[in-house]
Amino acid sequence: MNRFVVLPMVVAGAVALSGCFDGDSDSSDDVVRSEVRIIHASPDAPPVNILVNGDAAVEGADYKQAAVLTPEVGSYEIAVEGIVPGGNATVIGPADFTFEENVRYNVVAVNTVANIDAVVFQDEPGFSSSDEVRVRIGHLAPNAPNVDIYVTAAGEGNDLSAIAPLLSDVAFETVAEPVEVPAGDYRIQIAAAGASTAVFDSGDVALSAGADLFVGAVQNTGANASVDGASPVSLIVVNGADVAEIYDADQGAGVRVVHASGNAPAVDVLLDDDPTALSNITFGLAAPSAALDEYAVLAGGNYNVKVAATADNSIVAIDTDLSLTNGQGYSVLAIGLLGGDPAIEALALEDSVRSIATQATLRVVHASTQAGNVNIYLLPEDQFDIDNATPALADVPYKAVTDYLAIPAGTYNLRVTDLDGNEAISQDGVAVANGGVYTVVARDGEDGNGSVLEDLGLILLDDLAAL
């Protein structure tokens, strides 16, 4: 196989715990506690808060994140609250739960927002072994049919018709009983129930002794998921509150190159000194596409990337190294000035392609060498002057890249000004929809061809590319 994964490795961000429900406020030996693990596995849902008796115990848990709480045994009212623009909304519960000693309760938010639900199961905490690993597998992917799941030794299982699945005809929202297996190297494959062709292949995975793993098949929301033949699922591997993700071994990383250097000529991209299909990219354009999830697909790994003049590849403007991860999308922007100050360089961004049903998702990149620090305004469609408006983003410096921001669906007039309010960039009628993912790059003008660097403008990427 072309990939080897060692588990567990943490990829999810931290989840905030608050209040006494997590046990931090009372470490007394005479307090008897249970354990509750919350897992967000709803593919198009926003981050969520977990409410316990009406108070937030977990804040901002995002898709494929987990949190572990240690409440005092007893009864509680639990609800899941989606974080949405304009006000949060309860999406699961409230429901009453009773938590007992020496039990770990797993509450998994599953399905799409329109049909969001909770899968609840119990297991025993505290697994320990010097030579075994405990594994429990669940089908959490609403876009996948009933499946057969195969677990073989690493490098084995090329002919699924010749082996029996570990689990057969597993339906959505089913969680199998745990099994304890020798630590070692394994390969996990998933096929539609009764089929002999895998739709997911993990490659070779190392499972460490003493690990207590919940492995969930979730909807694939990584880069290249929209490519024909891409696996509909990925795997999340949850060990306590740590989450790793395994994409299909052949999914690859997604890469696009954006030409945002106003005085540089058309460029080609060389990978490890070899020419690529990313060639003759002119200022303001992206290759292979500016559209969402239309990347060049590259196997995960380390690459040397050179951006060279199309007319003469020996003239190299940018020479940098990139480390690419399967399932991750990357935008590599050529920014700065060729032979000028600030110098031309690569700005590499990690992209998200996940659609969130309850919001438009917007990211802004400041790539203009001429603008200085800026304020960015999103005005209602009937407002054209900033007047007394408050900037959506204030005092944004060159090379700044915002987080992905949740904004209400609608039509906006975009204004970029200097810190004194002088307008630098204006674009009216920018329409965004719930579920859309949008990237805006503030750029210089083009030095020559009837334009000058001070003629600032925008490069529109992802779901804005059609504008």
Image (tube, rainbow, N blue to C red):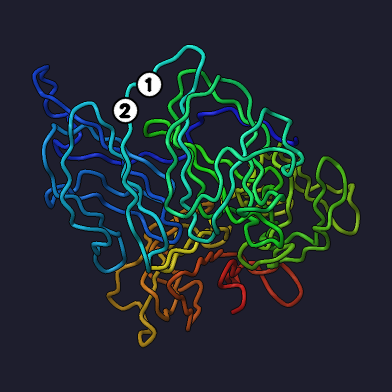
Q: Which residue is mark 2?
A: 124
- Of all residues, the one furthest to the bottom in this rendering is 382
**Picture quadrant of residue 444:** bottom right
- Position of 31 compared to 372: left or right? left
- Position of 383 compared to 12: left or right? left
Q: Which residue is mark 1?
A: 127
Which SS class for mark 1?
A: loop
Classify 37 as above or below 29: below
Q: Of residues 108 and 272, which is closer to you in this image?
A: 108
Which SS class for mark 2?
A: loop
Q: Position of residue 167 (x, y in %)?
A: 55, 41
Q: Of residues 370 and 261, which is closer to you in this image?
A: 261
> For the residue marked with disc 2, what is the amino acid?
Glu
**Picture quadrant of residue 192:** bottom right
- Position of 208 compared to 205: left or right? left
Q: CA distance from mark 1 to mark 2?
A: 7 Å
Residue at horizontal 47 percent and vertical 33 percent from the top: 10
Q: Residues within 10 Å of mark 2 (few under 14, many from 20)?
A: few
